[in-house]
Image (spheres, rainbow, N blue to C red):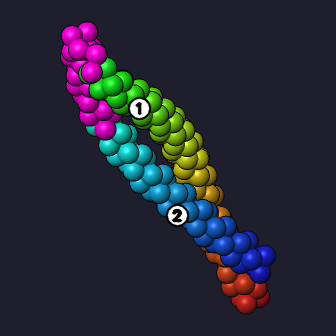
Amino acid sequence: MEKIKEKIAAFKLEAETWQDKYEDLKEQYKQLEQDNTEKENQIKSLTVKNEQLDTEVEKLETELAESKQLAEDSTTLKSTNDNYTKKNEQLETDLEETDSKLKETMDKLRDADLKVEELERRLNAVNEEKEAMEEKNEQLATQYAEAKQELDDIAASLENL
């Protein structure tokens, strides 16, 4: 009887441990979802900035073409053309850096997605284990009730003797 009580207590403790693990995984999942949302917002921001830079590059390229035409007409405008060229190179460098950052962010987002999928699989496995443990607990409770009834019947028959 005492062993059964100990086993039931052990099962209850184990069930509480699994519930704690489930809560921890659930919190990790929420954190990863929040991180994922933040990364998506960063990607959107970088995409908008990239589009703005593309527009600015196109504008500067147009200005550069006009400057080259003027340089052919006048040698005094050559220095202005050089300035636009440097500015264009800087913008292209900035654009390349922005593209690089965007690619890194996309890679991190993919990694985060993979981690979320892995955690979802783990969560499903934990849930399945929990259900199995609950079934086992119910079986043990039934066995306990049957054993207790049998013990009570034996005790009653012993008292009648």
Label 1 vs label 2, nearer the camera: 1
Within 10 angstroms of label 1, few (less than 14), some, or many (20 or more) residues? few
Residue sitting at x 78%, y 76%: 3
Q: Which quadrant does the N terminus fall into?
A: bottom right
Q: Main secondary structure of the magenta part?
A: helix
Q: Label 2, on which residue?
A: 23
Nearer the observer, 46 or 91: 91
In-image side of 89 versus 132 (left or right)? left
Q: For the residue marked with disc 1, what is the amino acid? A: Gln
Does 22 sit above or below residue 80?
Answer: below
Does 30 sit above or below residue 106?
Answer: below
Q: Position of residue 89 (x, y in %)?
A: 41, 26
Q: Position of residue 46 (x, y in %)?
A: 36, 39
Nearer the observer, 100 or 86: 86
Residue 64: image quadrant is: top left
Q: Which quadrant does the C terminus fall into?
A: bottom right
Q: Which residues are magenta?
A: 49-76
Residue sitting at x 47%, y 34%: 97
CB contact under 8 Å: marks 1 and 2? no
Q: For the residue marked with disc 2, what is the amino acid? A: Glu
Nearer the observer, 109 or 156: 109
Q: Is residue 141 magenta?
A: no
- Residue 51 visible? The answer is no
In-image side of 113 versus 160 (left or right)? left
Query: Which label is found at residue 90?
Result: 1
Mark 1 and mark 2 lie on one chain; the one further toward the N terminus is 2
- Residue 127 visible? The answer is yes
